[in-house]
Image (cartoon, grey):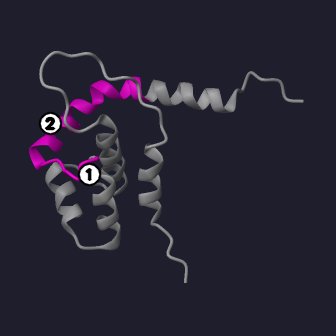
Amino acid sequence: MLHQKPLLVILVMLVDRIPMPPPPRKRGRPKLYPDRLMVKALIVMIIRCLYTAYSWLAFLEQETRLTQQLRVLLSDEHGRFPCRRTWERRLQALPDELPSMIGALGRYLLSLIQPWAQQG
């Protein structure tokens, strides 16, 4: 029997392949968790219709194969997982950063597809 990964896990893994714009230079404390992690969470929240950080974390607390794989993908390189308040704060700030992320994805896709190149 084949053990295939759930489609949601595959989709979250694809986010790692998307180029992200360089983070803006800001004063103050640097972000502990990367924006890419927040984008992964946002994708899962949209697909699973989870509207709050509380419902997001309640979903991840379930002991299923899907949530176990998602928890691994949504931890940082040190195995840390953001707390509820961090999710709330960062997801609230994400709309300000989405235009630059969408632009970076568009430029990346254009470089791959090259619609201006002659077909021949």
Near mark 2 (Cα within 10 A), the count class, few <14, some 14-19 or many ≥20, is few
Q: What residue is at 34 percent from the left and 72 percent from the top?
A: 65
The spot of residue 80 in percent (x, y) is: 19, 50
What residue span does the magenta drawing correspond to? 77-101
Badge nearest the viewer, 2 or 1: 1
Report the residue that reaches farthest toward the front.
78
Report the residue that reaches farthest toward the bottom.
1
Mark 2 / mark 1, whichever is N-terminal: 1
The vertical placement of 14 against 71, above or below, is above
Q: Is residue 69 magenta?
A: no
> Is residue 94 shown left or right of residue 18?
left
> Is residue 95 shown left or right of residue 8?
left
Q: Quadrant of the C terminus?
A: top right
Res 32 quadrant in image: top left
Q: Amino acid at mark 1?
A: Ser
| Marker count (numbered) | 2
Residue that carries the numbered disc 1 in the rendered image: 75
Q: Amino acid at mark 2?
A: Arg
Q: Gap between marks 2 and 1, in whole Å?
A: 17 Å
Q: Which mark is residue 89?
A: 2
Q: What residue is at 44 percent from the left and 29 percent from the top?
A: 102
* Tag 2 secondary structure: helix
C-beta proximity under 8 Å, tags 2 and 1: no
The spot of residue 53 in percent (x, y) is: 17, 49
The vertical placement of 60 against 40, above or below, is below
Is the magenta region chiefly helix, strand or loop?
helix
The spot of residue 73 in percent (x, y) is: 34, 54
> Is residue 28 shown left or right of residue 37?
left
Q: Is residue 83 magenta?
A: yes
The vertical placement of 111 against 34, above or below, is above
